[in-house]
Amino acid sequence: MSRWTKHIFRFFWLRSGNGIFDLIFNTLTKIIMDNDTSDWAVCAFMECAQSLIDRERYPEEMKREGTAATRYGYFIRKRILKQEPVYKPRTLMTRDPFIALGACYQHLLGSVDTERYIALTIIFKQVTIPFYLYRYETFNWFRNLKQDDREFYVKRLGYLKGFAELTKFERKHVLWPNN
């Protein structure tokens, strides 16, 4: 079975065998990797952005039995009480979906009409990264996606650094994945 088998739940895309905890990240990266700019991709982006605004990793309907209510409850049940199975709470956020949202936002902006451009921008500007996930580089990058007031030469250097990272990644993982 392909690792990119499609399972669609509302506008989310669930990668087979990966669970629901990375639902937003998997949905957004699927849109980028497939170069998808369809209506489904825009709706999926909006749904993922709203989930991040609400600080939810996946919809309530997908919640499994054994899911902890809080991160402290998860820690106590998993580490101290040694209960199995214990699943992470829906509200336990990581930086990954926020980074994927920013990348998908930039991907979709190049291919939508004016009305969708405005809708995507409005919802993207409402998304904020929780402070407990603070890393200077990520916060700065995310802020610059919303409003980039840097000098042109700084933007150009950022582009060149990003280009070098992309080329390195493609060479290592796409063109010659076994090396």
Image (cartoon, rainbow, N blue to C red):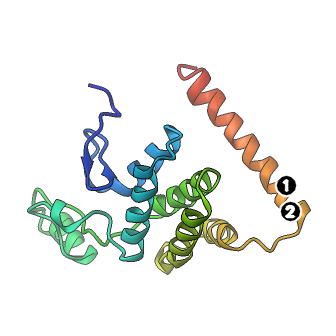
The image quarter in which residue 135 lies? bottom right
Q: Is residue 5 left or right of residue 167?
A: left
The image quarter in which residue 174 lies? top right
Q: Check disc 1 and report the residue beneath it.
A: 157
Q: Looking at the picture, does residue 4 appear above or below residue 153?
A: above
The residues bearing labels 1 and 2 have C-alpha atoms spaced at a distance of 5 Å
User: Which kind of residue does numbered mark 1 sit on?
Assistant: Leu
Q: Check disc 2 and report the residue beneath it.
A: 154
Q: Quadrant of the N terminus?
A: top left
Q: Which mark is residue 52?
A: none
Residue drawn at (10%, 62%), measured in percent from left and top? 83
Looking at this view, name the residue that lies furthest to the right. 153
Q: Are marks 1 and 2 in contact (CB under 8 Å)?
A: yes
**Mark 2 falls on what kind of element?**
helix
| Figure disc tally | 2
| Residue 115 position in % (x across, y down) | 56, 66
Q: Residues within 10 Å of mark 2 (few under 14, many from 20)?
A: few
Q: Residues within 10 Å of mark 1 (few under 14, many from 20)?
A: few
Residue drawn at (27%, 74%), measured in percent from left and top? 71
User: Which kind of residue does numbered mark 2 sit on?
Assistant: Val
Q: Looking at the picture, does residue 1 appear above or below residue 46?
A: above
Q: Is residue 63 left or right of residue 12?
A: left
| Residue 119 position in % (x across, y down) | 53, 70
Residue drawn at (49%, 37%), measured in percent from left and top? 34
Q: Looking at the picture, does residue 41 appear above or below residue 74?
A: above
**Mark 1 falls on what kind of element?**
helix
Residue drawn at (59%, 20%), measured in percent from left and top? 176
| Residue 116 position in % (x across, y down) | 54, 63
Q: Quadrant of the C terminus?
A: top right
Nearer to us in this view, 67 or 115: 115
